[in-house]
């Protein structure tokens, strides 16, 4: 693409002009969501400026959530937010599919460990009683969306890890263990800055908040079966509390 004639002189900041041009191009669809932008060198050539000026413009767009920078891969146009409903039956795959995105789920860790006081209280079991913990990474169109830590009472769900590995679905794994349906008893929503590991796994800047949900799911009889903590990329997810939930 040919270079642009920028206004040069007092009162005209070059990087802000470039930022405005790129923002307009993103809005007009010249750089669609998920697209990788040209390199700093290519943009510097296009606008006839140095790379530092381009870097300032890109940083401004990234701070406003229009771009994301992935180390070693480049700079990409941020995808549209996913509306993520929270209701009596909250299912990750269904929520992502409802947003017309392709859901994905990766198992990061699966282990049995003693219940912390917080987990034990949520599941109504004794402190240090064994729980099955599945740590999963939920994706939309191949991009990380949420990092979840799911805790289940091991006494009731001894075969849960094997069932999850076979089905790659928590709902289907629970069904295989005798719980065909379950509902959300409560959800607590908070916002905080991510840990270094969370930012790395979610592929987001360390200075951008994550949305955190703590939830308890119960079976048809009202017995707690799952305590989960999910951390969502704050610039990709919009939590929606459904009416009557």
Image (tube, grey):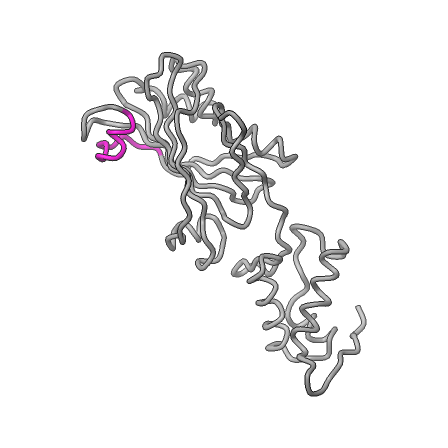
Magenta run includes residue 121: yes
In the rendered view, does 179 fall on the left or right side of 101? left
Residue at image point 50% right, 31% down: 86
| 120 is higher (above) or lower (below) than 237 | above
Q: Is residue 150 left or right of residue 103?
A: left
Residue 161 found in image quarter: top left
The residue at 53%/39% (across/down) is 139
Residue 29, given in percent of the width and then of the height, sits at: 75, 53
Q: Nearer the viewer, residue 116 or 183?
A: 183
Q: Position of residue 234 (x, y in %)?
A: 50, 48
User: Which segment did they paint magenta?
Assistant: 110-123
- Asked where in the image residue 53 lies, by quadrant, the reply is bottom right
Q: Residue at x 39, y 36 (%)?
A: 188
Rendered position, 226 above or below 17: above
Residue at point 42%, 15% (across, down): 176
Work out which quarter of the rendered image holds the N terminus and state it.
bottom right
Whether 23 is drawn above or below 228: the answer is below
């Amino acid at each position: 693409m040919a270079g642009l004639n920028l206004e040069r002189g007092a009162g005209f900041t070059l990087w802000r002009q470039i930022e405005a041009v790129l923002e307009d191009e993103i809005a007009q669809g010249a750089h669609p969501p998920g697209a990788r932008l040209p390199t700093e060198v290519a943009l510097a050539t296009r606008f006839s400026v140095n790379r530092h000026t381009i870097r300032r413009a890109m940083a401004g767009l990234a701070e406003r959530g229009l771009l994301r920078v992935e180390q070693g891969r480049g700079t990409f146009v941020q995808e549209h937010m996913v509306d993520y409903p929270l209701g009596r039956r909250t299912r990750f795959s269904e929520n992502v599919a409802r947003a017309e995105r392709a859901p994905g789920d990766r198992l990061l860790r699966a282990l049995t460990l003693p219940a912390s006081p917080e987990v034990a209280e949520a599941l109504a079991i004794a402190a240090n009683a064994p729980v099955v913990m599945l740590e999963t990474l939920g994706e939309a169109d191949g991009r990380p969306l949420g990092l979840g830590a799911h805790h289940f009472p091991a006494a009731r769900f001894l075969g849960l890890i094997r069932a999850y590995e076979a089905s790659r679905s928590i709902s289907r794994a629970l069904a295989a263990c005798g719980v065909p349906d379950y509902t959300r008893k409560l959800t607590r929503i908070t916002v905080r800055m991510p840990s270094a590991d969370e930012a790395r796994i979610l592929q987001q800047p360390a200075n951008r908040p994550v949305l955190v949900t703590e939830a308890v799911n119960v079976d048809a009889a009202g017995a707690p079966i799952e305590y989960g903590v999910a951390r969502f990329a704050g610039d990709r997810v919009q939590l929606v509390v459904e009416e009557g939930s």
